Amino acid sequence: MNDTLSNHTPSSIVCIQGGTVIDPGHVNGRADVLIQDGRIVEVGYPLKHSIEQDDSVTILDASGWIVAPGLVDLHCHLREPGFEYKETIQTGSDSAVAGGFTSICAMPNTKPVNDNAAITQFMLTKGQEAGKARVFPIGAITKNSDGEELANIGELVGAGCVAISDDGRPVMNSLVMRRALEYAKAFGVPVVDHCEDLHLTDGGCMNEGVVSTELGMPGIPDASEEVMVARNLALADLTGVCVHLAHLSTARSVELVRHAKAQGLPVSAEVCPHHFSITEEAVRGYKANAKMNPPLRTDEDMQALRQGLVDGTIDVIATDHAPHALQEKQLEFDTAPFGIVGFETALPLTLRLVDDGVLSMEQALDKLTRAPAQLFHLPVGSLAPGSLADMVIFDAKEEWVVDPEQFQSKSRNTPFGGMTVKGKVKMTLVEGRLVYDAR
Amino acid sequence: MGWKRKDLLTIAELSIEEIELILTTAESLKEVGGRDIKKVPALRGKTVVNLFFEPSTRTRTSFELAAKRLSADVINFSPSTSSVVKGETLLDTARNIESMQADIIVLRHSSPGAAEHLSRFVQSSVINAGDGWHEHPTQALLDVYTIKEKKKEIQGLTIVIVGDVAHSRVARSNIVALTKLGAEVRVVAPPTMLPLYVERLGAKVYYQFEDALNGVDVIMMLRLQRERLGQALLPSIREYAKLFCLTSERLRLAKPDTIVMHPGPLNRGIEISPAVADSPAAVILDQVTNGVSVRMALMYLLSGAA
Ligand SMILES: [Zn+2]
C-alpha cells in the first residue's frame, strides 16, 4: 500500500521527521510520524504513505530528539475555581504543555469542591478555552470532601469526571471509603486515595525522623501513610474494587502494595518525581519549597520507590503539581502550605532514573504515558494509527538549569530551582496542533 | 578569635570557640550587675527590639535588662497572636520594626526556624529567643555558664535532662551544647515525650528516673506544660509527678554535690518538690542572674562593640 494523503484540508497534515519514536509497548526506534486531522495516520521509516512536499504540509524536524505520546498526569491541582491567585486552568495548562503533558487530571480540592456537575463542566469548559492540555476533572468522593456523605458520583461521572478522590482531605472513615468503593463500581471509575491517617499526622509538617528531631519540627510518621495503605488494600480485597493509591512515599507502602499485587488484589499506585529524587535533607534551612504532603522521606524510602517502579509495584509517575503563591511559601515552615510546582520538572527528573540505570527510556515513558492513560481509561497515551495525535518531542540530552522564574505556571514553588537537569521539551502537540514550541 | 556572626540562631551552628567567647565575654560583663550604677555605655545609641509572638515575661525581661545595662534603647513589641493567623505577620512586622532602625531583633516565635527565616529578610541582627520546639540558644548558654561556674569544666560531667524533651527547645539546645562541650547527656521521660532518634542528637535514653540519676553531676528539670494533657502523651499530672517529680529522696540518688537546674517557671510539686527547689543544690536563681550576663555578652558581640 502506498497511499498519497489527500491535501484537500491542507493545514491538517503534519509530518514529524527525523526523530526517535518511543511509543511504549509498540515502537522504539527511528521513525517519522504522519498526522492528519489530529490523528495518527502512520508511524514508521520510511513512511508507507507519501506526502506531497508542498507548503500545505507542516513538516516538523525532530532530528536527534525523542518523539513520544504526550505525557499523562493523573494527579494535579489546577486551583480553579477558588484559588486563581495560585494557578488558573489556563496557566496550569500552559505549565503542563511546557512540561510535555497533554492530558492532566485535576483534583477536586477547589473552592467550591468539585462535587457536582456544574463545577466539573466549568473545569472542562475552562480547559477547552485554554486550548492546551486536555483537562480531565476528578470528582470528590464525599460532599465537600467532608468525608461524611457520598458525593453524587453518578452525576460527576456523567458530567465527565474520570475518577473520584478526596485528595487533600483524605477519607478517614473506613466505612465511608468502603461504600465509596462499592458505589463507584457501578460507574467503573477509579477511586483514588491520598493515604494519610490525620490523627497520626497530628499537625506534622515534614518526615518524622532524624531531621525533624534536629529541626524541632513536628513530624509526619511513615505509619501515617502506611496504616491507610493497609486499610485501602483490605477494602480493595473486601469490595473487589481497584483502589488507586496516590503519591506513595515510604518503603513499607511499596512493600505492602507489592505483597497485595502478588495476591492478586485490585490496586494501582503512583509515585511523584520529588519522592524518588530528593530526601528530607532538602528541608534543612526550613525551606518551605521542600514542604509537601506526603513529605520528602529518607534515602531508603527513595530507593524503595525506585525499586517499586522497576518491578511494576508502582504503575505510574504523577506530578502532584500543587502551586502556591510566593507569600504563602514565605511563611514560616510550619505555617506554609504543602506542595510544589510539578509539571515543568517531571520529565527531566524521570529521565534521571534512566541516566541512573533504574529504568529504560521506554519504561520511564511508559509510566508517564501508556500506563496512566490505561489506569484512568483515558483515550490517549498511544501513537497507534487512529490515535489522537497528542505528543511530546524532547531532547533527552540537553542540560539546563531549573529557573522557577521561567515557569509557565503562575507559581514558583519548587525545591529544584538552580538544579542542573537533563532532558528538555522542544515541542508539545495536542491533536496535531503545536501547543508548545521551544525550538 | 573575634565574633563574625550577624545573628545568633542556634547552638548547633556555634563552634566550641564561639561558645567560649560568649562565656568569657559574659564573665567580664557580670561585674556590671554588682555595681551601684549597673550600666556601661557599650550599646549607647543602639536599638534593641524584643519581638515576642509568644508571651514570656521572664525571657523578655532578661533581654530587656541586658540591653538596658548596655545603655541600648529597648522597644518591647508583642503582637497579639490571638487576632491574627499564626505566622501571618512575622515578616511584615519585622520589616516595620527594621524600618525603625533596629540594630538587634530578639525574636520569640512558636514556629521552628522562625528566627532563621527572619534573619534572611532583615539586615538587623537576630537573636533567637526560642523558636517552637527547636532551639532556645541563650537558655543553653546561660545554663552552660551556670554549670561552669559551679563545676569549672563541662568536659567529663554527667548531666541528666528530665521531662518533655520532645516539645522542648531548652532540651534541644542543651543537648547540643553540652555534648559539644564534652559532657555525657542523659534524657529521661515517658517515651511519649522523647522525639524519634533523640539518641542521634547525642543523648542516652532512660525511661526510669531513678536509673538515670546514678552518678549525675547536674540535674536539669524541664517544665511540664499542662496543655500536653489531652494529647495522649500522659495519663495524668498525678502519674507524671509520681514518676518524675524531683524529690529529696530522688536527689540522694545523684552525686552528693549535684546541682539542680530549671529554666522556670516552676511547677512546684509536679516536676520539682518545694524542698528541692529551695535546697542548696538548686541553682535556679543563679541561672536567672547569669541569663542577664550572657544576653549582655551576646548583644555586645553582635553589635560589633567587641
Ligand atoms: Zn494528596
Image: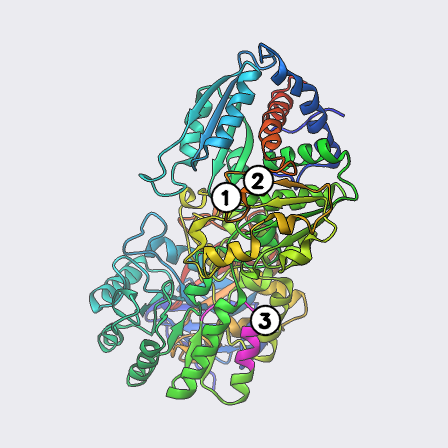
User: Pointer 1 indicates a residue of which chain?
Assistant: B
Hey, what amino acid is under mark 3? Ala
Q: Position of residue B42 (x, y in %)?
A: 61, 13
Hey, what amino acid is under mark 1? Arg
Position above or below: B33 against B209: above
Residue A251 tag number: 3
Position above or below: B296 against A201: above
Mark 2 residue element? helix
Mark 3 residue element? helix
Q: Are marks 1 and 2 on the same chain?
A: yes
Q: Closer to us: mark 1 or mark 3?
A: 1
Q: Are marks 3 and 2 on the same chain?
A: no
Name the image quarter holding the C terminus of chain B. Answer: top right
Q: Closer to us: mark 3 or mark 2?
A: 2
Q: Nearer the viewer, residue A141 or B149?
A: B149
Please tell me how crowded label 1 is: few (under 14), some (14-19), or many (20+) other residues with Cα within 10 Å.
some
How many angstroms separate mark 1 from mark 3 (CA)? 46 Å
Does residue A383 appear in the picture of this structure?
no
Which residue is denoted by mark 1 in the rendering?
A: B268
Instruction: Judge from the rendering whether residue A238 lies leftward or rightward of residue B287; answer left or right.
Output: left
Mark sitting earlier along the chain (1/2): 1
How many angstroms separate mark 1 from mark 2 (CA)? 8 Å
The answer to whether the residue labelled 1 contacts the one labelled 2, judged by CB atoms less than 8 Å apart, is yes
What stretch of residues is rendered in magenta?
A: A246-258
Residue B277 tag number: 2
Position above or below: B277 against B226: above
How many angstroms separate mark 3 from mark 2 (CA)? 49 Å
Q: Position of residue B210 (x, y in %)?
A: 65, 57
Hey, what amino acid is under mark 2? Ala
Q: Nearer the viewer, residue A321 or B4?
A: B4
Q: Residue at x 44, y 43 (%)?
A: A331
Q: Position of residue A352 (x, y in %)?
A: 62, 63
